[in-house]
Image: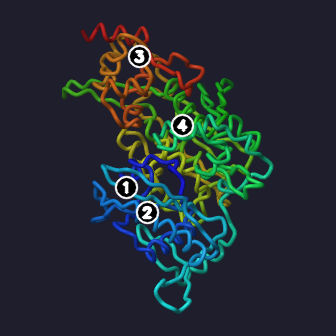
Amino acid sequence: MISKLPINIDDLLHRRTVESERIEYKEGWNPESVLHTLCAFANDFHNLGGGYVVIGVEERNGQPQLPPVGLATTQIDAIQKELLNLGHSALAPHFHPLTATYEIQGNTILVLWAPGGEMRPYKAKVSLSSKKADWAYYLRKHTSTVRATGADERELVSLAATVPFDDRYRQTASLEDLSSLLMREFLQEIKSELAADARELDTEILGRRMNVVGGPVEMAFPKNVGLLFFNEHPEQFFPATQIDVVYFPDGPGGDRFEEKEFRGPLGRITRDALNYIVRSYLKEAVIKHPSRPEAERFWNFPLGAIEEALVNAVYHRSYEIREPIEVRISPEELVVLSFPGPDRSIRMEDLQAGRAVSRRYRNRRIGEFLKELDLTEGRSTGVPKILRAMKTNGSPTPVFDTDEDRSYFLIRLPVHVGFDRDELPNQLGAEQVAEQVTEQVQRLLQALTEEPLSTKSLLEILSLNHRPTFLQNYLQPALAAHVVEMTQPDSPRSPTQKYRLTDSGRKILALKE
């Protein structure tokens, strides 16, 4: 057993960062049922990244019941020994989950983490009580573990020894290429209890606990996902691992353009690119109507749609193809281009309607880390969220495009018809901006009256617990309106980053008094 897992246990129990089909709750220890679920997670039929079995928590109507029932210390010790035996004698090839105990509301629970296995397909004994030596393959169907049969069994067997690219070992790299500092920062950000122990662990042990290091002790290697998130220059291993943001003020055919490249760990460049787009190119319009008291508000491009489009590209692009993610912005549209395109099992008409569900994901671990960082929600949610965000903003319907060979994927977000297509709107005067300031942004401005503050301090002052809510409703609109600015604009991801009022922000506070 290891001390803690690289997750936020509260988020896991409330299914905030892990989809329900990847979690199974057990009130008590049922070895046969747990065995079959571990086998299903190890097979990882849809490349979702395996899953978790939480023992000591009752499930009722699909929801975990808290406070947990819990387990006695003697029970946990016995379960540990039986798990070890089952991994050798009842699973083939051998498979052992990573385990940890947690104190939740005065009771102890046991969490089993079963990442997608490297030697699939796995099979398990059908019965632990029968003397018959019957074995079968198991997989997950929604939130249930089922025995694989027919076409599903044949497809699972066809996946033999195939591991998604992001979960493979990188034999041209060494453990020195993993930054323990970046790994610790990640654990601190997601509030994992493993963060408390991380400083005392060497890179190999910490990497194994985070499942970004694999292989035998005498020849351990970093996994590709570890290098993508926890190396300062992943492009040295995966050329063109970058996000290019290009603005064409005169349209794509014009002679002028502005370009900015973002390179570095995946989580960082995703956030930095989004923050840059928000600060530089997102504008809000306010139109007053004489016939009604409420003003009409809309953005040239809604932030929610841009976030989903960009994170979708980071999640689903191939890091074996030497092409960057491109964000092209013009007065007419914002386009996100990545390579290759969606799986052939997805019909474009289903994608356009927001009904597409991928049969199997290209990257199973990248999504896992993006979810922990609150950059994405879960499986097949991106396109529906883009459609909703554009509709809510009153924008034209987005366009999803690829070619017959599925060699690229393009998401086209047309500008809101209320904006002048000849140019992006200029910054407004203080009185006009003041009319646009929402109640949330007003609270943020008041919090910054005395001194610059960090995100953590602002969350405390504003009594907020959900970081994405703060970013989307408070900070990003304030940055876009140029009423708040970063103290370190050249290092948006700096641990010492703070935010302060701009001259416009101070003027707005004065106007509101």
Mark 2 and mark 1 lie on one chain; the one further toward the N terminus is 2
* Image point (54%, 72%), residue name: 39
What residue would you read off at disc 2?
76
What residue would you read off at disc 4?
334
Q: Nearer the viewer, residue 129 or 404?
A: 129
Mark 4–mark 1 Cα distance, whole angstroms, equals 50 Å
The image shows residue 276, relative to residue 197, as above or below, that is above
Mark 3 surroundings: few (<14), some (14-19) or many (≥20) residues within 10 A: many
Mark 4 and mark 1 lie on one chain; the one further toward the N terminus is 1
* Image point (67%, 51%), residue name: 213
Q: Indicate which label's residue lies in the foreground, 1 or 3.
A: 1
Q: What's the colour scheme? A: rainbow
Mark 2–mark 1 Cα distance, whole angstroms, equals 9 Å
Secondary structure, mark 1, is strand
Please, what is the three-letter code of the amino acid marked with disc 2? Ile
Please, what is the three-letter code of the amino acid marked with disc 4? Leu
Image marks 2 and 1: residues in contact by CB distance under 8 Å? yes
Mark 1 surroundings: few (<14), some (14-19) or many (≥20) residues within 10 A: many
Mark 2 and mark 3 lie on one chain; the one further toward the N terminus is 2
* Image point (50%, 36%), residue name: 188
The quadrant in which residue 456 appears is top left
Q: Indicate which label's residue lies in the foreground, 2 or 4.
A: 2
Say the numbered circle drawn on residue 275. Answer: none
